Amino acid sequence: MIEMHWGDPITLYPTKDGVAERFSTIEKARHWLRRHWPTSDEARQAALEKIESAMDCMSPVKDARRAFVAAALSAGFVPDRAS
């Protein structure tokens, strides 16, 4: 599988104890949303849909990034300022 250009990496910091996680590929973002995400809400679902659409070349990757950051905020993560 060829990795899609995701832009600058996004680092998410947990608001509670935990380790920051860096997302440098859209594939890792999708994996985390599917397998490791702490919440199952509308923002997570919207991010999954946008990411999968971008991976199928049906929508811009920048829309997927925005949806991913929105899901991160909804789940209680704090993204780095570059995101």
Image (cartoon, rainbow, N blue to C red):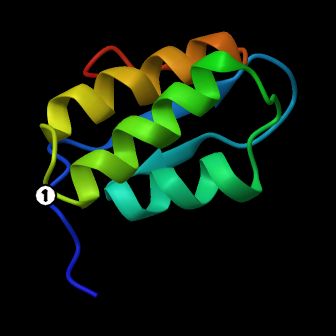
Residue at the location (40% across, 23% down)?
A: 67
Between residues 33 and 19, which one lies in front from this camera angle? 33
Residue 77 at least partly seen: no
Single out the residue that lies furthest toward the front: 58
**Amino acid at dot 1:** His
Residue 67, placed above or below residue 33: above
Residue at the location (67% across, 54% down)?
A: 34
| Quadrant where the image shows the C terminus | top left
Position of residue 9 in the picture relative to residue 19 (left or right): left
SS class, disc 1: loop
Single out the residue that lies furthest toward the bottom: 1
Between residues 8 and 42, which one lies in front from this camera angle? 42
Would you identify the image quadrant in which residue 4 lies?
Answer: bottom left
Picture coordinates of residue 40, whole percent (x, y) = 79, 30
Residue at the location (76% across, 16% down)?
A: 15
Position of residue 14 in the picture relative to residue 44 (left or right): right
Q: Which residue is mark 1?
A: 5
Q: Give neighbour class at mark 1: few <14, some 14-19, many 20+ (Cα, 10 Å).
A: few
Position of residue 6 in the picture relative to residue 23 (left or right): left
Would you identify the image quadrant in which residue 17 lies?
Answer: top right
Residue at the location (60% across, 31% down)?
A: 45
Residue 71 at least partly seen: yes
Between residues 65 and 17, which one lies in front from this camera angle? 65
